[in-house]
Amino acid sequence: MIAAAMRPLTVSCVIDAPRERIFDYLADIANHLEFSDHFVHEFRLERLNSRGVGAAARFRIASSLARLPFGSRLASTWVEEVLTELEPPHRLAFEGRSGRIDRVPTRSEWRLTAHDHGMTRVAYTFASDPANRIDRLRESLGGRTWLKRQFARGLRRLRSILEQGEPSSREARIPAGHSPDI
């Protein structure tokens, strides 16, 4: 559950696919780049196994400040995310850190509920808990509204991927020194 002290953003949509299929797709963290690459960059898996509890990724999130002339230093932030809870087929929870020197705790959650005739309502909630004024200012300048729009666009892309057939076979980068054949 997302803590009350954190500042949550929630987006949702209905996808015409069984929730077991959506859950299996989301349980592999490597698939997340496919529907979020419009604002997620430099996506790297932190573990060889990208499925299940403990799967982790590190990536950059572009910010709405990237378009401003003074925004080059504030244009993106690193995020690390670890899959911490799986409750098949209805809930996945991630914990992580973001911001300068990874000092901002984050939490996100996917909730999948059955909807009419084999369809699924997918809700994504993201929360961060900036501890100091500088981090809160960076978050507000980075645009929570902008971030919510990016999450909503990602959900629309997820719906399109899952309703139009099989997801692509694009591979995420794996940790250095490892072979994907292991």
Image (tube, rainbow, N blue to C red):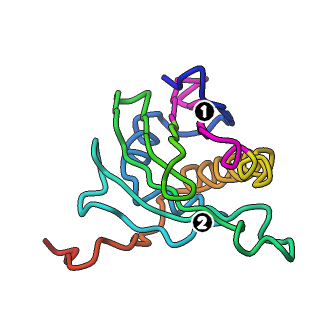
Picture layout, residue 145 above or below residue 75: above
- Specify whether residue 124 is in view: no
Identity of the residue drawn at 34% across and 29% down: 88
Three-letter amino acid code of the residue under disc 1: Ala
In terms of secondary structure, where does tag 1 sit?
A: strand
Q: Amino acid type of disc 2?
A: Asp
Q: Residue furthest right?
A: 69
Q: Position of residue 109 (x, y in %)?
A: 51, 34
Residue range of the region highlighted in magenta in the rendering: 109-136
The quadrant holding residue 57 is bottom left
Q: Are marks 2 and 1 in contact (CB under 8 Å)?
A: no
Query: In the rendered image, which quarter contains the C terminus?
Result: bottom left
Q: Residue at x 48, y 22 (%)?
A: 1
Compare residues 86 and 3 and report the one nearer the observer: 3
Decide if residue 181 is on the left or right side of residue 64.
Answer: left
| Residue, disc 2 | 37
Which residue is at the front of the view, 164 or 25?
25
- Residue 179 against residue 131 in the figure, above or below: below
Q: How many marks?
A: 2
